[in-house]
Amino acid sequence: MYAQKNSNCTNMGKGGIFIKIFKEYPDIVTVGQLQHMLDIGRNTAYKLLSERRIKAKKVGRIYIIPKNNVIKFLAEN
């Protein structure tokens, strides 16, 4: 379900492959972009955010999600 690690990740350092894969995304991503990055549904995206598995700030009803936090999540899982 979540994007799988590539075997080349060890050559690029922890999370390095994901930096390369996600270079087209802005530094701050939306929930919709997070869904696309991880190939997950809306409910799963909000669950990851509400459980703080991906660290983000909530401003009103909107999540501010640093792209680096998504990369850290993938590198650690």
Image (spheres, rainbow, N blue to C red):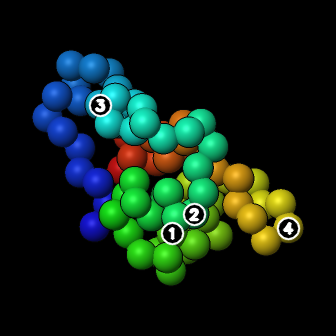
Q: Residue furthest front?
A: 24
Residue annotated with mark 1: 45
Label number found at residue 31: 2
Secondary structure at badge 1 equals helix
Q: Amino acid at mark 1?
A: Ala
Q: Give whichever of discs 4 and 1 has the lower sequence position.
A: 1
Q: Quadrant of residue 46?
A: bottom right
Q: Secondary structure at mark 4?
A: loop
Q: CA distance from mark 1 to mark 2?
A: 7 Å
How busy is the neighbourhood of tag 2: few (under 14 within 10 Å), some, or many (20 plus)? some
Circle 1 or circle 2, nearest the eye: 2
- The CA distance from mark 4 to mark 2 is 14 Å
Identify residue type, mark 2: Val
Q: Amino acid at mark 4?
A: Gly
Q: Which residue is mark 3?
A: 17
Is residue 30 left or right of 33 when viewed as pictured?
right
Image height of 62 relative to 43, above or below: above
Q: Which image quadrant for residue 41?
A: bottom left
Residue at the spot of label 4: 60
Q: What residue is shown at x 14% (from left), y 34% (from top)?
A: 7
Left or right: 3 in relation to 66: left
Residue at (29%, 54%) from the top-left corner?
3
